[in-house]
Image: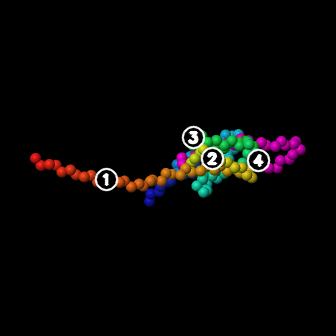
Amino acid sequence: MIRTLVNMNPTSEARTFEEIFEQLFGAQTRNVSPATSTLPIDVLEREGNLVIRAAVPGIEPSDLEIQIENNVLTIRGETQNEAESKEDKVYRREVSYGAFSRSVRLPENLNVEAVSAEFKNGIVSITLPRVEEEKPKAFRVPVKTVETQSIPEA
């Protein structure tokens, strides 16, 4: 009887899966440093548009920076912690404060010049219309008749 030991590394397997996912659906980059938190997003298609929604509670729309450069959409901002009094007793702290940034690689077939953004109830929705692909045009080629000239016999 032969025994085979399979050495699996779950972290390596997850990284491989993430690389395959990024190849299929476009690379996603996160700009996260110890002082920067990540931003949860949804990416969906609605009525021929790519829609990216990001949860940004506690942010004013004027404090958001949304930028597209080299087909990468970046959302940046910063949440401020309200001042605490010395008499405050903090029992739990789960809300994170500070700078955040999230970048997403966009597909090529979007009209980035027609981008729009809306803010409602702590959610920013960024809408990018897809560029309609040119459909192949069929056209009829006229066929000319060429008359043959007879060659005189010598």
Describe residue 68's horizontal placement relative to residue 147 as left or right.
right
Q: Residues within 10 Å of mark 3 (few under 14, many from 20)?
A: few
Instruction: Give the extent of the magenta segment.
Output: 80-109
Is the C-beta separation of discs 4 and 1 under 8 Å?
A: no
Question: Which amino acid is tagged 4?
Answer: Gly
Gap between marks 4 and 1, in whole Å?
A: 73 Å
In the picture, residue 60 is in which quadrant?
A: top right
Circle 1 or circle 3, nearest the eye: 1
Q: Is residue 98 on the magenta stretch?
A: yes
Q: Earlier in the sequence, mark 3 or mark 2?
A: 3
Query: Please, what secondary structure does the residue beneath circle 4 have?
Result: loop
Tag 2 residue: 115
Q: Name the one closer to the observer, 148 or 71.
A: 148
Give the residue number, with chain letter if any, for mark 4. Answer: 58
Q: Position of residue 76 (x, y in %)?
A: 68, 42
First-in-chain label (1 vs 2):
2
- For discs 3 and 2, the disc positioned in front in the rendered view: 2
Check disc 3 and report the residue beneath it: 70
Which residue, given by chain and number where applicable, does mark 1 sit on? Answer: 144
